[in-house]
Image (spheres, coloured by chain):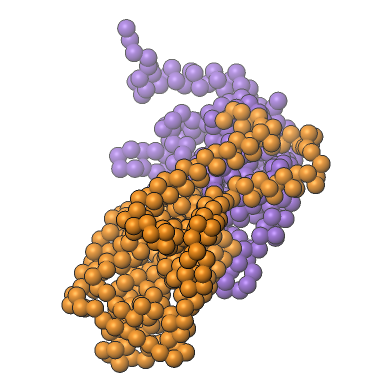
Chain colours: A orange, B purple
Amino acid sequence: MAEQATAVQATSGAPSAAPPAHWTTVAHELRRLIERREIAIFLVAIALFLYFWTSTTAFATYDNFVTLTQFLAPIAVIGAGEAVLLTVGEVDLSAGTAFVFFPFVVYFLWANAGLPLVAAILVSLVTAACFGAINGLLTTLLDLPSFVTTLGTLFALDGVMLITSNGVQETMALSGTGGSVLGNYGWSEILWALGFTAAVYVLLHHTRFGSHATATGGNLVGAAEAGLPVRRVKIWCFMLVSFVSAFAGIIDAIRITTLDPGNDGTTEMFYAIAAAVIGGTSLMGGRGTIIGAAVGAIVLGILYDGLYIKGVSAYYFQLVLGVAILGAMAANVQLRRAAMRRWRRLRR
Amino acid sequence: MTSPATSARTPGPGAAETENILEVEHISKSFGAVVALRDVNLTLRRGEVLGLVGDNGAGKSTLCKIICGFHRPDSGRILLDGKEVHLRSVEDARRHGIDTVYQDLALVPQLPIYSNLFLGREPTFGGPLRLLARHKMRAQAKAYLDSIKVHIPDIDAEVERLSGGQRQAIAVARATRQQVKVLLLDEPLAAMGARESALIIDLVKGLAAAGQSMIVIDHNYTHLFELCDRLAVLQNGVIAFDRLVSETSLEEMTEYMVSEYRRQVETGRVNGPAQP
């Protein structure tokens, strides 16, 4: 700390020992790039891609890319939502359950109640946002950890799904242009995912709301003292996660045409949180990256798909995933420490 | 160095009005059976730097929290610019022009300096999308920090990279960036090295020279004598000593505090050192 104090002179005025301006600009930009938390996972993604591309013939094919994107698209969308929520210092364990439940709501409204499909989807999405608001209200008003509240709502929502569906699978087959837009076209899922990722990226990194979310997660007391509505910010983030999870679920359900109440969605939820975390989003709050979550989802997708093509048992996937999460986390922490050290040296 | 008298300063904005920017009259506050403030009368003149001293538990922080709108007094009133104000919340006090720099600084370590300076008041564009006007924030932040002579090499640096003194400077800058009538600084020099303290002392002096009215709470008399125009000592819930710095000295002040302490030990108000 003392070292830092001397290294970082503030009011001594003239930056006397400063190197030439163009050199500092280049070094500055380079440092910013290296310090980006997404860089580690980005390199991992490229390495994995090259590995599976060169070691198999079936990986780099059109059909496989379609499969790959369809696997990673929901993870990317839910992961983007979770990254925002982790940024405010909360987590949503019920996101995966929302992912499987809200397609059922669409089905009930559309097939059973006879609502037009678009209306059914809209009602379902609004309901999903309300479900997120419940998560947020429980967490902020009862002052409970979101780990607990959303664990509770996870089981509750799963229960509601099992009761209402009677545990019976349903089929939701669409045709025509609408069906193509909503998931039938091979690339539609990843296109939606791209759109959502871009929107959430702008939200977190380029809007006032995103800045307040970072402040809320970074220094809750301080943000409140600065006059930010920290509870409201958190509730909006919970609503966002439920909303995007529901949307991803609806698109995914339309693509695979089957609704399965036997799936409680926890796998999707854990993949999404894993994608956010290995992408560089901190579980401690205050530090979220949407690009990181997207690249994290791509890494999970490439791993899953590549290992499958190589004939590695799906059982290994979990093991590799676990190691990948640990490795990426360790790399992130180390990289950040190194960046801080370098920064202090340069400032001296 | 003893500070020059108030008259030597350039008057603050709107100096034509009342001489006293803040008047605290007969304030009392109890928490259950504990009387924190008995009958506090305190005046802050326009452009003045007032040092508020007192032992732990003397009621300093209670008084500070009443002035900044966090607590409501049981009785008494607060006049700002000669007009009585009822401060309902910290946000309300801020709207009236009373801002506080807390000891915890209320900065967000993960956000860049310019974002911290604008926290909660970010300029935006794009209508309802409320996109951050980053260029504007950067430029204004840099210009403002330059104007108060806080030189930070990189306005984009996250606050977590700054030293304690720099953080304090940013917190003060955030409070003063918009016109503030009364600025409360809660132990701005706590836990700071010599170099860091010098940085903050320079900053506070600069603000004072620009006519900013301030109340500084601190334990270090040497610092207070360097910074303030006037010192007030809060003891047992009342202002027990209130004098211009130019009319007193560090020795007198220390002597007063020691004799007061002895008197209290004798009257049994405070426990003296344990007898062998």
> Residue B213 location, x and y as percent?
64, 44
Q: Is residue A195 left or right of residue B143?
A: left
Which quadrant holds the C terminus of chain B?
top left
Give the number of callouts. 0
A284, above or below A243, in the image:
above
| Residue found at the far top of this picture | B276
Seen from the viewer's position, the closer of residues B204 and B194 is B194
> Residue A41 location, x and y as percent?
52, 52
B265, above or below A195, in the image:
above
Seen from the viewer's position, the closer of residues A95 and B89 is A95
Seen from the viewer's position, the closer of residues A255 and A136 is A255
> Residue A190 location, x and y as percent?
49, 72
Seen from the viewer's position, the closer of residues B80 and A65 is A65
**Residue at figure coordinates x 63%, y 22% from the top left:** B249
**Residue at figure coordinates x 40%, y 90% from the top left:** A175
Q: Is residue A92 left or right of residue A223?
A: left
Which quadrant holds the N terminus of chain B?
top right
> Residue B44 location, x and y as percent?
60, 42
Q: Quadrant of residue A259?
A: bottom left
**Residue at figure coordinates x 34%, y 57% from the top left:** A313
Kindly tell me whether residue B46 is visible in this rendering: no
Kindly tell me whether residue B131 is visible in this rendering: yes
**Residue at figure coordinates x 37%, y 80% from the top left:** A254
